[in-house]
């Protein structure tokens, strides 16, 4: 990780000691430096080590090609990961990074993004890492709207620990830890994020380079917490988990493309569509059986998350009727900006005592 500049104590704040000076420096945002990079500039000298055929290779290649388009200097990007196969990402991206603690990537990234708003902060995590031991950290990062981008690789299995069922495995999944089939109802990561009032939520497929890049682009442009669920194939312990959506014969039938301002029509020859049901939710209908005016037009910018949540509930555990794209993208104040504003007020109104305010009066010596 980067450290604060050596001139951090020379800010000349009235009465400001080292703590006040360091915070003042850390919340001063000049924005990431702009630069021109190519995909090769994002690659490190580390050997990429995943199982041959793993979907992570495709995602890594897409991310290495995409990040240079942001025009941000490598030293202004930070990749924070937890534990799992996906969490090896920081080794393979030529930026600052941290391979952190199981499930705690969102918490660590929150501290970084809040104290260094000049950085582009990314979290790379998996369905087990983020939704099991890390579930609490994830939902609080989302509700706080910290300015960072979270890539959640969902392969519906624990790959690194050799094939146990995960929080997203479907009911009845037979694994080493559920030999008679899982009896747990799985999380829908998109529904979970929307339930936490996430301001940006998207979904993409590892093998869909164009779709993945477009969702990543919108996520990177978003101010606030952006969560992108990426369906990722684990060809060793859960091979073919998403074939229903990948195979040409079935993919168009069961995938619902989300395009802003476009009617939700899908399937071969647009045979299926999305309409409102009788209770304010959404349902699937045959296009030739409904009035065109009844077909829902996608709007990810609706302030109320109820529409996006209803979209997320269209898909079943067997992946039929799976929306792909951006579910929600709205603007709200970010945690880091509001924190910086409070610090500005504290400096202006209580500058001589800011260090005392931060340290507090209740101290004691343990002998």
Image: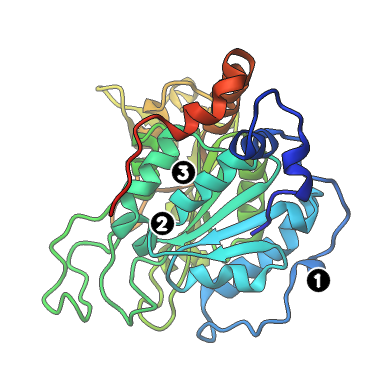
Q: Secondary structure at mark 3?
A: loop
Pinpoint residue 58: horizontal percent, then vertical percent.
61, 71
Name the mark on residue 104.
2
**Do labels 2 and 1 touch, CB within 8 Å?**
no
Q: Nearer the viewer, mark 3 or mark 2?
A: 2
Q: Residue at x 43, y 69 (%)?
A: 83
Q: Secondary structure at mark 2?
A: loop
Label 3 and label 2: CA atoms lie apart by 44 Å
Q: How is the image coloured?
A: rainbow
Pinpoint residue 186: horizontal percent, then vertical percent.
25, 55
Vertical position of residue 95 compared to residue 303: above or below: below
Q: Which residue is mark 1?
A: 40
Vertical position of residue 223 compared to residue 243: above or below: above
Q: Residue at x 65, y 25 (%)?
A: 15
Q: Nearer the viewer, mark 2 or mark 1?
A: 2
Name the mark on residue 208.
none
Name the mark on residue 271.
3
Label 2 and label 1: CA atoms lie apart by 30 Å
Q: Between residues 180 and 224, which one lies in front from this camera angle?
A: 224
Give neighbour class at mark 3: few <14, some 14-19, many 20+ (Cα, 10 Å).
some
Q: Nearer the viewer, mark 3 or mark 1?
A: 1
Q: Secondary structure at mark 1?
A: helix
């Amino acid at each position: 990780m980067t450290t604060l500049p050596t001139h951090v104590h020379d800010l000349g704040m009235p009465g400001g000691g080292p703590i006040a000076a360091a915070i003042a420096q850390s919340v001063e945002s000049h924005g990431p430096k702009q630069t021109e990079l190519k995909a090769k500039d994002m690659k490190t000298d580390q050997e990429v080590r995943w199982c041959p055929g793993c979907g992570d290779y495709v995602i890594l290649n897409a991310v290495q090609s995409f990040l240079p388009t942001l025009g941000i200097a490598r030293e202004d990007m930070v990749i924070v990961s937890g534990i799992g196969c996906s969490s090896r990402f920081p080794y393979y991206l030529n930026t600052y990074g941290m391979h952190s603690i199981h499930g705690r990537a969102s918490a660590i990234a929150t501290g970084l993004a809040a104290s260094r708003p000049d950085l582009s902060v990314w979290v790379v995590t998996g369905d087990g890492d983020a939704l099991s031991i890390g579930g609490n950290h994830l939902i609080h990062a989302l509700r706080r709207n910290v300015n960072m981008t979270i890539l959640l690789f969902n392969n519906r299995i624990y790959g690194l620990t050799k094939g146990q069922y995960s929080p997203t495995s479907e009911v009845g999944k037979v694994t080493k830890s559920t030999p008679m089939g899982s009896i747990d109802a799985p999380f829908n990561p998109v529904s979970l994020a929307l339930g936490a009032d996430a301001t940006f939520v998207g979904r993409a497929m590892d093998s869909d380079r164009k779709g993945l890049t477009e969702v990543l682009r919108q996520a990177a442009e978003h101010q606030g917490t952006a969560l992108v669920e990426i369906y990722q194939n684990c060809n060793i312990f859960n091979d073919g988990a998403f074939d229903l959506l990948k195979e040409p014969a079935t993919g168009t039938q069961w995938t619902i493309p989300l395009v802003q301002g476009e009617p939700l029509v899908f399937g071969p020859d647009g045979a299926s569509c999305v309409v409102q049901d009788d209770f304010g939710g959404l349902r699937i209908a045959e296009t030739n059986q409904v009035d065109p005016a009844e077909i829902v037009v996608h709007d990810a910018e609706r302030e109320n998350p109820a529409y996006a949540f209803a979209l997320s509930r269209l898909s079943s555990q067997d992946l039929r009727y799976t929306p792909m794209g951006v579910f929600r993208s709205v603007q709200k104040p970010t945690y880091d900006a509001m924190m910086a504003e409070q610090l500005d007020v504290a400096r202006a109104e209580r500058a001589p005592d800011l260090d005392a305010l931060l340290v507090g009066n209740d101290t004691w010596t343990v002998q």
